[in-house]
Image (cartoon, helix red, strand yellow):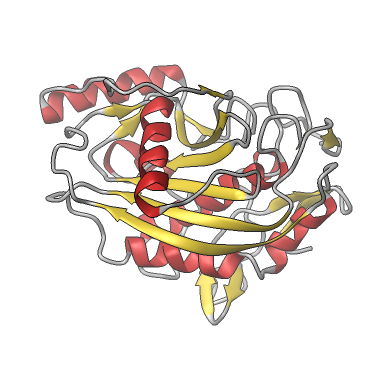
């Protein structure tokens, strides 16, 4: 959603900061001597733990606001920003990559096709590249809060190193380690570097430790992939990816001027878990997922598939 997606309240952010100071001795906002030559758009993020505060009892459909969408086949360039020496679940990167490989051909992604812009409609998504940035032990200190600017700079670094290009249908999701957070009040957000062409990116925090509230909250739920942080990050990833696809620059499809994108209207709404013995609600390419539903204008409700 615009200016929000999955979020912590400001009070919780302060609480996180205090905990971080106690546990790691120093928690500070990331700084850099490099500056972006282009500006960033408004942060549009995801809030955990409760229903989206902007969701009314009866949700009117999203409306189109004149801007582009991520039309056609979206090219996904996955960035895993994980300095060495930090423990990450051994299945985390593999499962995140598998999600992006599977989602583009799913019935869930088909919901996006009804949200056309002047440049066409989102049709599918294909993972075109993966970069594990683990070469710099000093990339970010433990306990640091990474700003959208710091994430944007990492995206630009990834583009330079790998020869990737910006574009309205190129998407750059960034994943960071368990020991860092974000200066935003969100578990994840999508944003863009305001240039011609734009660079569409997102940041998904590792949903453990300080961000355990970002995990899937279903009573009695068992992770279909035996990795709660992995499955939680995947659902959050879908939230941001679908919102970026249908509202990449804040001028696409949403319900309100500052809130109510395709994922926000169904946040923490999963529908029946009928697959993998009640663990999952999606099966793609013989793999199981638990992913929040997305808003379907045609059905005027949250749906698991078009």
Evaluate whether residue 223 shows in this view.
no
In this rendered view, identify the residue nearer to me: 151 or 18: 151
Q: Is residue 93 above or below residue 23?
A: below
In this rendered view, identify the residue nearer to me: 83 or 16: 83
Evaluate whether residue 226 shows in this view.
yes
Give the residue drawn at x 58%, y 23%. 42
Give the residue drawn at x 40%, y 60%. 130
Q: Is residue 205 above or below residue 257?
A: below
Which residue lies most toward the bottom here?
286
Which quadrant holds the C terminus?
bottom right
Q: Is residue 267 above or below residue 163?
A: above
Relative image position of residue 78 (x, y in whole percent): 44, 55
**Relative to 264, is 117 on the left or the right?**
right
In this rendered view, identify the residue nearer to me: 36 or 175: 36
Relative image position of residue 239 (x, y in whole percent): 59, 47
Q: Quadrant of residue 73?
A: bottom right
Q: How many marks?
A: 0
Give the residue drawn at x 13%, y 30%. 23
Q: Is residue 231 above or below residue 152?
A: below
Give the residue drawn at x 47%, y 31%. 186
Relative image position of residue 22 (x, y in whole percent): 14, 24
Which quadrant holds the N terminus?
top right
**Relative to 49, is 181 on the left or the right?**
left
């Amino acid at each position: 959603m615009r200016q929000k997606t999955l979020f912590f309240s400001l009070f919780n952010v302060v609480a996180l900061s205090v905990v971080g100071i106690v546990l790691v001795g120093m928690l500070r906002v990331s700084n850099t001597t490099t500056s972006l030559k282009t500006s960033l758009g408004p942060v549009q993020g995801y809030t955990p733990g409760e229903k989206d505060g902007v969701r009314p009892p009866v949700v009117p459909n999203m409306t189109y606001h004149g801007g582009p969408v991520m039309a056609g086949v979206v090219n996904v360039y996955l960035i895993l920003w994980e300095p060495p020496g930090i423990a990450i679940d051994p299945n985390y990167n593999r499962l995140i990559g598998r999600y992006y490989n599977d989602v583009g051909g799913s019935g869930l992604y088909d919901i996006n096709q009804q949200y056309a812009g002047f440049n066409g409609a989102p049709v599918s998504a294909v993972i075109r590249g993966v970069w594990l940035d683990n070469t710099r032990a000093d990339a970010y200190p433990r306990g640091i809060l990474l700003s959208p600017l710091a994430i944007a700079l990492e995206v630009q670094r990834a583009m330079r190193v790998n020869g990737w290009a910006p574009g309205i249908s190129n998407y750059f999701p960034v994943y960071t380690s368990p020991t860092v957070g974000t200066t935003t009040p969100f578990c994840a957000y999508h944003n863009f570097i305001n240039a011609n062409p734009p660079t569409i990116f997102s940041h998904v925090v590792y949903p453990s430790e300080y961000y355990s509230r970002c995990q899937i909250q279903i009573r009695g739920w068992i992770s279909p992939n035996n990795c709660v942080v992995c499955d939680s990050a995947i659902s959050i990833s879908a939230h941001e990816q679908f919102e970026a696809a249908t509202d990449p620059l804040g001028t696409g499809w949403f319900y309100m001027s500052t809130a109510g994108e395709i994922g926000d209207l169904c946040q923490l709404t999963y529908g029946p878990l009928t697959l993998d013995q009640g663990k999952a609600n999606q099966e793609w390419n013989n793999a199981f997922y638990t992913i929040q539903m997305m808003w379907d204008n045609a059905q005027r409700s949250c749906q698991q598939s078009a």
